[in-house]
Image (cartoon, rainbow, N blue to C red):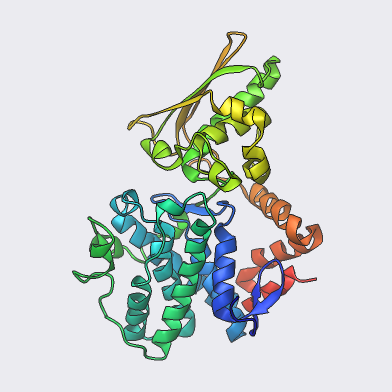
Amino acid sequence: FTGSDGNSTIFGIGQHVDISTAALINGIASHADDYDDTHVDTPVHPSGPVASALFALAEWMGGVTGEEFLAAFVAGIETECKLGVAVFPEHYNVGWHITSTTGSVGAAVAVGKLLGLDTKQMQRAISIASVQVIGMHESFGTDTKPFHVGAAAQAGLTSALLAKNNFGGSLEGLEAKRGWSHVVSTRENLTEEFSTFGEVWETTKNTFKPFPCDRIIHAAIDGWIQIHQEAKEKGLDVTKISNVTARTHPRVLFLTDDPEPETGLAGKFSVYHAAAVALLYGEATPSQFTDKAVQNKTVIALREKVHVTSDDKVSEHEAYVAVEFDSGEKLEVHVEHCIGSYENPLDAEFLQKKFVDHVSTQIGEERAKRALKAFVGIANSTDVGRIAQAFEE
């Protein structure tokens, strides 16, 4: 429905489009499964907006080296996450989708660095991006949520290109009294956070998701999967459960208190559905968050037995879960640091398998492995834009 002429690629299908469309579509795809990265100190999923804009631009420009690309990528991630820390949690708690509200600015900085913007041009790029605020919690569990990320990538790219051509904008778009930080949050701490820019690296605080759903329920899922495994070892029937409980951080119910999700997307934001599939199947993969899985009668029956309470003393990466069986036996698990957290990170083998397994469903295993090799070797690339060719036949 948008431009079909251009040399930027939509990953996975190989279609060439204009750079703006590529940034939009790849940005949407990056967040469609809620299976992306997450910054430790905020709920920002930083790579989607920044990488989607940069890859589109790199193909259009040609000759962008891996070193140039990664420097721009880190600049964008640092900006995005610093902004997130400066306004979190107030900004998030009123309903803003912090990934996209910060992502447009992060993408603008990344693209601006690759374009070689001077100081005033970069300030204007940031300002232009900052007025394109997009994303609210009301869209969570719908197709519109990943659209936030694609729109942020597109907005950041457009902002930097406009600034490159001396399109006007405020030089204080973020910090001014009527600028971004004061408008989108009741608290802002930009000066303090950005005083550590280039010293305290937010990129090193990035983590990766083991489960394709809201990060806030990962600790509980981790615990329920452990209980599934223990039940199996003890010969307990997971279809004969009488009660399921969890004590979690308050944000779990704030974001995922949906006892009757109707779609797979909605299931990603239902702690009740997550409990049911983790206990029944011992895993939480994309196949557990489909329309079919959400409408499964066995899943629904177990979902109705799940009870969750909030506890301010429980951290976001922690959960206390318990399951009572019809036999009277009770299994309990305390997850202090869930799998995929900063303290319990996913290893390279897990991440590579995750990539190949899921990309293979779209382009086949051979091409998926070729794409993985290209991404892993990006630092040594002499033309990052050519990486998209790894997805093609």
Tell me if 226 is positioned left or right of 251 in this view: right
Task: Name the residue at 79% across, 57% down.
Answer: 365
Position of 115 with respect to 313 (left or right) is right
* Count of numbered marks: 0
Please state the horizontal and vertical placement of residue 150, each as a whole percent of the image: 52, 66
Quadrant of image for the C terminus: bottom right
Instruction: Identify the residue shown where x is 30% and y is 65%.
Output: 194
- Can residue 276 be spotted in the picture? yes
Q: Quadrant of residue 390?
A: bottom right
Q: Nearer the viewer, residue 363 or 191?
A: 363
Give 122 or 304, whichever is nearer the viewer: 304
Above or below — where is 52 with respect to 143? below
Query: Which residue is at 60% across, 84% downward?
Result: 60
Residue 128 placement (x, y as % from top left): 35, 78
Q: Is residue 248 above or below residue 91?
A: above
Question: From where the camera sits, is residue 225 visible?
Answer: no
Query: Quick one: which residue is furthest to the bottom in this view?
Result: 165
Please indicate whether residue 324 sits to the left or right of residue 202 in the image.
Answer: right
Residue lying farthest to the top in this orientation = 328
- Above or below, comparing residue 144 to residue 305 in the picture: below
Q: Position of residue 273 (x, y in %)?
A: 56, 35
Q: Which is nearer the eye, 242 or 370?
A: 242
Query: Which of the image's four quarters has the N terminus?
Result: bottom right
